[in-house]
Image (tube, rainbow, N blue to C red):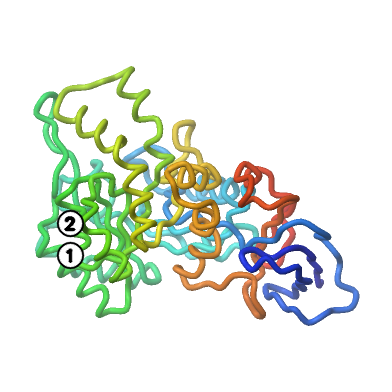
Amino acid sequence: MAFHLRGIVVPDDEERDLYVVGDRITFEPLTRAETVVDGGWLLPGLVDVHTHPGAEHPGDPLDEALLRQHGSQHRDAGVTLLRVPGSAARLPAWFGQDDLLPRVDGAGPWLAAEGRFFPGWGRQVELAALPGVAVEEAEASGGWCKVIADWSVGEGAERRYGPSVPPAVLAEVVRQVHAAGGRVAVHSQHGEGCAAAVAAGADSLEHGMHLATELLDTMARQGTALVPTLVAFAGTPQQLAEHPGPEPMRSWKASGWARHPGLVRAAHEAGVTVLAGTDSLGGPDAPHGQVAQEIGWLARAGVPAEAALGGGSWIARRWLGLPGLEEGAPADVVAYRADPRRELALLEEPSRVMLRGRVIR
């Protein structure tokens, strides 16, 4: 069956007629195509570049029923492509291939130094083994791996957050994974870990609230993207007010959130690719399908609305290797009654979602 969509294509701002056959877009008119959108704005399907479906509590095993549920929540919000930088286990082959669920770029389980991640989660290995394990996971997962560069240690007043993978080891991880044709995402919320990730030439820095602004030009030059996951930390002031916790963790959390929006704005102004990721895990505190909120937070941080939206749509798709609304492109389209760049709240109300050439809503 063929479909017809007419609207203003974003970001080109040109009114076009799109035709869909199977999982491909064409601009060649097709007779007997069913019109499913007639007017409004057409965007490439939304993208959440940092989400963790399949398990809702740290330490839980991967649950395939939850994978389907979480994927459906993303899809219903207009998200047609997920990057999963870390999961409770390697994702099953069907996840990312199901016609009714988003496309998926996985990264295998989180990779961490022994004892420096949630107990029972990820692959926690000796530092000497980390580069080889990273290559193994990148090859098994289609190209990506995810490394935890820093984590908390200690209890009570002794608890602190700091580097857990030495810079030389992280650099060797990136070198070997790149040599194997893969890409490396690095979790870091600490200044030293962020610096090590940038020096290593990681492909993406996840979170990054204590990243030194002096490193932004290097990130832009070498193509290290920033995925700040602002929505995941927006509740920090309230959490600290209700449960302040001991020092020095309290000050570290408070200062990290205080500088995070300004850092994101500075990153965009420096030419760093800033992308929309939610760090969603599931459950009431971190639900899936919230990329619209993250795009809104990027804009509130000072990223122009078009760039913020692109970071959760066409820019993110290009970064992950998929085109936008072009001849021969995969048929992932989300439609809105008005221009969402002028009113980002509209992202919560797609009028039509098309995934793999199927009308979802």
Q: Which amino acid, mark 2?
A: Ala
Q: Which residue is mark 1?
A: 199
Q: Residue furthest front?
A: 269
Image position of 16 (left or right of 177):
right
Q: Secondary structure at mark 2?
A: helix
Q: Is residue 144 above or below residue 214?
A: below
Q: Is residue 88 above or below residue 357?
A: above
- What whole-number distance in Å separates the C-alpha atoms at marks 2 and 1? 6 Å
Q: Position of residue 119 (x, y in %)?
A: 23, 41
The quadrant in which residue 6 appears is bottom right
Q: Secondary structure at mark 1?
A: helix
- Indicate the quadrant containing the N terminus: top left, top right, bottom left or bottom right: bottom right
Image position of 274 (left or right of 338):
left
Q: Position of residue 269 (x, y in %)?
A: 37, 57
The quadrant in which residue 200 appears is bottom left
The structure residue drawn at horizontal position 25% and vertical position 80%, both measured from the top left corner, is: 179
Q: Position of residue 180 (x, y in %)?
A: 28, 79
Q: Which amino acid, mark 1?
A: Ala
Other-residue count near label 1 (Cα within 10 Å), few / some / many at <14 / 14–19 / ≥20:
some
Identify which residue, 164 or 97, lies in the foreground: 164
Residue 147's disc number: none
- Please report contact status of discs 2 and 1: CB closer than 8 Å, yes or no: yes
Identify which residue, 321 or 267, lies in the foreground: 267
Residue 195's disc number: 2
Other-residue count near label 2 (Cα within 10 Å), few / some / many at <14 / 14–19 / ≥20:
some
Image position of 50 (left or right of 331):
left
The structure residue drawn at horizontal position 51% and vertical position 48%, both measured from the top left corner, is: 295
Q: Position of residue 55 (x, y in %)?
A: 42, 44
Q: Residue furthest top?
A: 242
Q: Is residue 143 above or below residue 227?
A: below
The structure residue drawn at horizontal position 16% and vertical position 67%, both measured from the top left corner, is: 171
